[in-house]
Amino acid sequence: METWQLLLGVGAFMTPIVLAAMARDRALITMIKTTTDPIHDRINRVRDEYVREDHLNGHLSRIEKRFDDMANDVRRRSEQTDKRLDEITRMLRNAERDRSDEAP
């Protein structure tokens, strides 16, 4: 048997095996792609729509700090208002007492 006949025989034997392997690989790649595409879409959607926990915690701590600052501001203003109301009440009592002292 000559070399070219041997190579032709080996080539004829290997060609269907290689083509079958290529067809199998293409089918496997297609199956993997159709299976993983929805998963990748969901992962991307979750990544885009949800906030990282450390970012959320940072935002919440800033909001809580601002609320605390506002509450302290309200308390301070309330104390000032209470002092003013106490002063007005004291002045009205003094004025009423002065009027009652002047009335014969």
Image: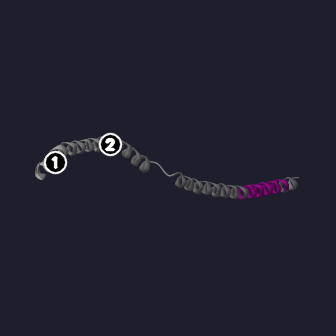
Whether tag 2 and tag 1 are in contact, CB under 8 A, the answer is no
Q: Secondary structure at mark 1?
A: helix
| Residue 67 coordinates in the image, percent (x, y) | 62, 54
From the viewer's perspective, tell me whether residue 82 is left or right of residue 17. right
The residue segment tinted magenta is 80-97
Query: Label 1 belongs to which residue?
Result: 11
Q: Name which quarter of the figure residue 26 lies in.
A: top left
Asked if residue 86 is among those painted magenta in the image, a careful observer would answer yes
Q: Exactly how many numbered labels are in the figure?
A: 2
Q: Residues within 10 Å of mark 2 (few under 14, many from 20)?
A: few
Q: Residue at x 70, y 58 (%)?
A: 76
Residue type at tag 1? Gly
Query: Label 2 belongs to which residue?
Result: 32
From the viewer's side, name the closer residue of 63 and 34: 34
Q: Residues within 10 Å of mark 1 (few under 14, many from 20)?
A: few
From the viewer's side, name the closer residue of 87 and 103: 87
Q: Residue at x 43, y 50 (%)?
A: 47
Q: Residue at x 79, y 58 (%)?
A: 91
| Residue 10 coordinates in the image, percent (x, y) | 17, 47
Q: Secondary structure at mark 2?
A: helix
